[in-house]
Image: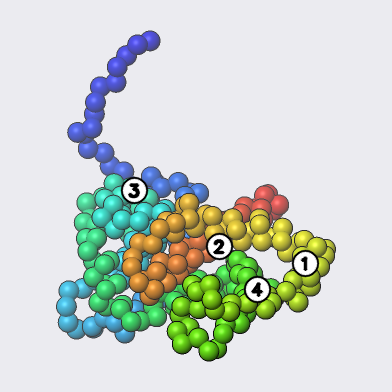
Amino acid sequence: MFKPRVSTQSEYEFVSIDELVPDNHLLRLIDKYIDLSFLLEKVRPYYSDDNGRPSDPTILFKMMFIGYIYGIRSERQLQREIEMNVAYRWFLGLKFKDLVPHHSTISWNRQHRFKGTDIFQEIFDEIVLQAMNHKMVGGRVLFSDSTHLRLTLININSNCPLLSQCTRSKNKVKVVTRHVWEEHKEKVRENRLSKSGKMLYKFRKEKIERSFADSKELHGLRYCRLRGLKKASEQALLTAACQNMKKIATHLARLEKVCCNSLG
């Protein structure tokens, strides 16, 4: 039966914000399985106990976590998303009418309060430590994503008065003597074709490269948000920390579900 719905958007409803967030929502899982209480102790030295306006640093960092988890690269957009998203508000501990901290608060703290500190490295290390406590990190094998670089030794005429011009002059001697890594190339090839090497390559393709792809596609690491090596390092550390939080939470939730099913 054709019946247009009458708009009721101006009506008031009594509803709990906790009821609106699904039990399997990622932020609910992170809140349940990731202990973020360490944040207060980590940042306490950078705040005054008796001066300035009261603030909760946990909300600031949780805002940044939301941005990195969901790939929201703009802090202005992050503020707008939190204002409209119920799950984001629930994660931050904000009510429906609570004001969301201004986006400039994040940039000010990064540029002033936490400038020159190792707080972002400490956050990353703490999340890794929690993964180790959950037996998710063994520490037996180290994986890295890399590219082979061909390194050469070049013999240039030492009598050349301007060495910078030797590579451009046809009259000067420029001889490639050998590739430095040539003697190890065959050994690397044999190891790659071995059974353990194939397993390692398969693991790297399925796990490591997929993790880097996720960080680019889902968590905003495709583009540098900030300029400078230190700030780029901050982005990489927080991206990796949020990826680890996501993996820890989903893994523990899956284990708990399996245990409940086996007991039930």
* Tag nearer the camera, 1 or 4: 1
Give the residue at the far bottom of this rendering: 159
Q: Earlier in the sequence, mark 1 or mark 4?
A: 4
User: Residue at the location (48% across, 55% down)?
Assistant: 216
Measured as percent of width and height from the top left, residue 128 is found at: 54, 72
The amino acid pointed to by label 1 is Arg
Q: Mark 3 and 4 residues: CB-CB less than 8 Å, in contact?
A: no
> Are there few (<14), some (14-19), or many (20+) residues within 10 Å of tag 3?
some
Q: Which residue is mark 1?
A: 189
Q: Which residue is mark 2?
A: 248
Q: Which residue is mark 4?
A: 142
Element marked by disc 1: helix
Q: CA distance from mark 3 to mark 4?
A: 40 Å
* Tag nearer the camera, 3 or 4: 4
The amino acid pointed to by label 3 is Val
Q: Which residue is mark 3?
A: 86
Q: Is residue 32 visible?
A: no
Q: CA distance from mark 4 to mark 2?
A: 19 Å
Compared across the picture, whether 199 is left or right of 73 comes to: right
Compared across the picture, whether 40 is left or right of 123 comes to: left
